[in-house]
Image (cartoon, rainbow, N blue to C red):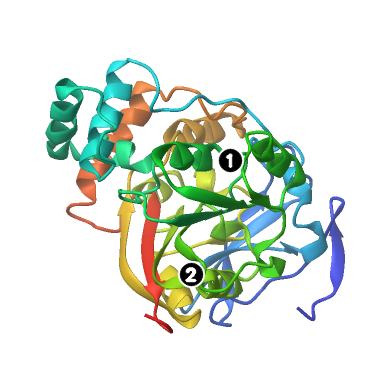
Amino acid sequence: MNAAVVDNGGVHVVEAAVCPLCGASGRVRYGQLRDRSWGAPGTWSFRECVACSHLWLDPCPIAEEIGRPYASYYTHGVERRSPLKGNGFWTRCRRGVLDSYGYRGLAHDSTERFLGQAMRFVPPVWEECEETVHSVPGPPRGLLLDIGCGDGYFLRIMRDLGWTVQGLEPDPKAAAFARAYGLDIIQSPIERASLPSNAFDVITTSHVIEHVLEPVTFLSVARRALRPDGLLYVFTPNAESWGHAMFGPSWYPLEPPRHLHIFRPRNLVACAERAGLQVVDVRTTGRLHLFFDASVSIHKTGQYRFDDPTIHASVFDRLFRVTENLLVHVHPYAGEEIVMRCTNAARG
């Protein structure tokens, strides 16, 4: 960026008036936004591209300041128990679904196996259970890297299921918490990470790409680390969702100033292709946890503090997710979350 660096409430930023994906001009879609959850300083807006409709944060923190809004972020070690341990009804459903999803032997008994088969006919429940493994089917088949692994919660689940796991996390507090569980964590931004080439069978990155300055560079580094027959799974909020249309500037996944990009499916696919990846499929889901409750709170009070990722959703939140999961069968890109699966086009 050649723009002048200025102060925005104590954060050094640059103006970002043109689309970071295609270079076209952008109009202000939402202005005068502040951090609604973690008290980061500054006043922000989101611009929308007149050509490709991409949404991005303006002004944009400079690279050295990207970490500042995460000082009290929830990845800093809220204890969470495994969702596959226990004897509650939903835990038993989860084990049964994942047993059907390729993780054979996970179901404890015939009742759990029956529940797993039955949930095929209840797509919202199936998708919530599938989210436990970030849509990665079994059986475990090698080395899995989670980019932006936070406190290592997902890696602990996958390790218990039989994967060999490694994590990449730029935040030192989150990385230290993950290492306390015996996890192999590379502490580095992906753009500067020393990842081995052609090494990983599966790479996952859940709600990370919206936080990075250069999404194409991010995906290019992941591609180089992926084996020729490996798969990359990318998850990110969806600007075309029903929830975004309903809540507008109060939509929780905007999350200024941590979210630098809000993708539409076609724009995320374009970034993947520019990075040399081949997109296998792209879809949306309604399974984004607590977004409805958070958006309602932001609309009413201007705030939503997400201190505890284990907090239970309200009945209304659950009903919205069920309805949206049904809606995507009519409007495939109406879900809150984009799920993109890619392979390595250059070597595959």
Position of residue 303 relative to residue 278, above or below, is above
The residue lying toward the viewer, choosing from 31 and 225, is 225
Look at label 1 and name its amino acid: Gly
Q: Quadrant of the C terminus?
A: bottom left
Q: Residue at x 45, y 33 (%)?
A: 290
- Of pointers 1 and 2, the one earlier in the residue sequence: 1
Q: Quadrant of residue 202?
A: bottom left
| Label 2: element kind | strand
Position of residue 88 relative to residue 130, above or below, is above
Q: Residue at x 25, y 39 (%)?
A: 104
> Residue 192: x percent and y percent?
72, 68
In this rendering, position of residue 176 left or right of residue 155: right
Residue beneath disc 2: 226
Between the residue at mark 1 and the residue at mark 2, the CA separation in whole angstroms equals 20 Å
Which residue is the extreme one toward the top? 87
Q: Residues within 10 Å of mark 1 (few under 14, many from 20)?
A: many
| Label 1: element kind | loop
> Residue 182: x percent and y percent?
63, 38
Residue beneath disc 1: 152
The residue lying toward the viewer, choosing from 130 and 84, is 84
Look at label 2 and name its amino acid: Leu
> Residue 304: x percent and y percent?
59, 31
Q: Is residue 118 visible?
A: yes
> Residue 128: x percent and y percent?
32, 37
Q: Is residue 62 visible?
A: no
The residue lying toward the viewer, choosing from 255 and 177, is 177
In this rendering, position of residue 320 left or right of residue 247: left
Q: Quadrant of residue 121?
A: top left
Pointers 1 and 2 in contact (C-beta within 8 Å): no
Q: Residues within 10 Å of mark 2 (few under 14, many from 20)?
A: many
Q: Quadrant of residue 76?
A: top right
The residue lying toward the viewer, choosing from 29 and 186, is 186
